[in-house]
Amino acid sequence: MNADYKVAIFDMDGTLADSMFGWNEIYKELFNKLNLTYSDDLLRSLNHISMEQRIDFIKIKFNLSKSHEEIRKIFLDIAIFYYSNIFKVKPLMLKILHKIYDKKITCVIATASMKECANAFLKSNNLEKYFSNIVTLDEVSRAKNFPDIYLKAIEKEHVLPNHCIVFEDSLVSIECAKSAGFATCAVYDEVSKANAQKLLESADFNVGFDLNPTKLFDLF
């Protein structure tokens, strides 16, 4: 394993941010404002596509007369409130960020959320100094069950996958990153705990699991 990392790529929701618990509430508020009935299954079906695609999906599925831009504004106002006031950085991830920053490794966010949400989260948690770039799914053509978003991140930083490590809480994202040649670190989150064993087996490193952690900190 090449430990000469130049770039660390972080997913936001469930990885950096303790935020997965709040997304049902965001959707419930959105659906309430749109006078729609919310289903818990909806979030799972939209999880890996971009926010703009989620808006289009909701508009088409429920035959809404509001424009994409009108729905987006309602959605964004609700989401930014959560990222600015409720969602906090995971303490263990903050420690990792400190270590990486000290080693002058470039940090990038790769998220399915809107860039405005990522900026609000970084600002409210005093994390802006750590990150050089934010990449969203809206910048690539395929969802997060493909490695495109990570490849876009390193394109911006002018490095190759073997000099990068990807931090993710999602099994499919870990598998995609590995398939493209990235080192990977699985991050524990309650929402993905059903896949905990598979995450441990698939990722090169792990943090936050109830087992003895791998020597991730020794790499930085």
Image (cartoon, helix red, strand yellow):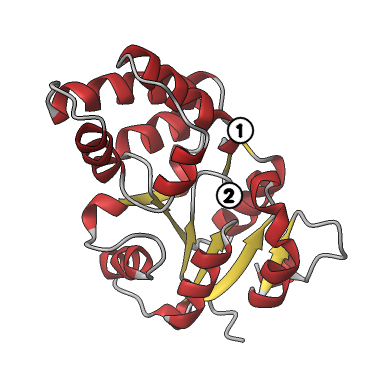
The residue located at (46%, 73%) in the rendering is 176
Mark 2, residue position: 15
9 is higher (above) or lower (below) than 176: above
Q: Which mark is residue 84?
A: none
Look at the numbered disc 1 and give the secondary structure of its residue.
helix
Between 53 and 220, the residue placed more toward the observer is 53
Would residue 74 be found to the left or right of residue 46 on screen?
left
Between 39 and 171, the residue placed more toward the observer is 39
Q: Would you identify the image quadrant in which residue 199 lies?
A: bottom right
* Image coordinates for residue 37, horizontal then vertical, percent: 41, 21
Q: Would you identify the image quadrant in which residue 61 lies?
A: top left
Q: Is residue 7 visible?
A: yes
Would residue 196 be found to the left or right of residue 33 on screen?
right
Position of the N terminus, as image quadrant, is: bottom right
Look at the numbered disc 2 and give the secondary structure of its residue.
loop
Q: Residue furthest bottom?
A: 1
The residue located at (22%, 55%) in the rendering is 139
Q: Which mark is residue 21?
A: 1
Would residue 173 be found to the left or right of residue 75 on screen?
right
Between 97 and 13, the residue placed more toward the observer is 13
**Which amino acid is tagged 1?**
Phe
Would residue 144 be found to the left or right of residue 97 on screen?
left
Instruction: State how many labels appear.
Output: 2
* Image coordinates for residue 173, horizontal then vertical, percent: 49, 65
Q: Is residue 125 visible?
A: no
Comparing marks 1 and 2, which lies closer to the viewer? 1
55 is higher (above) or lower (below) than 183: above
Between 161 and 106, the residue placed more toward the observer is 161
**Which amino acid is tagged 2?**
Thr
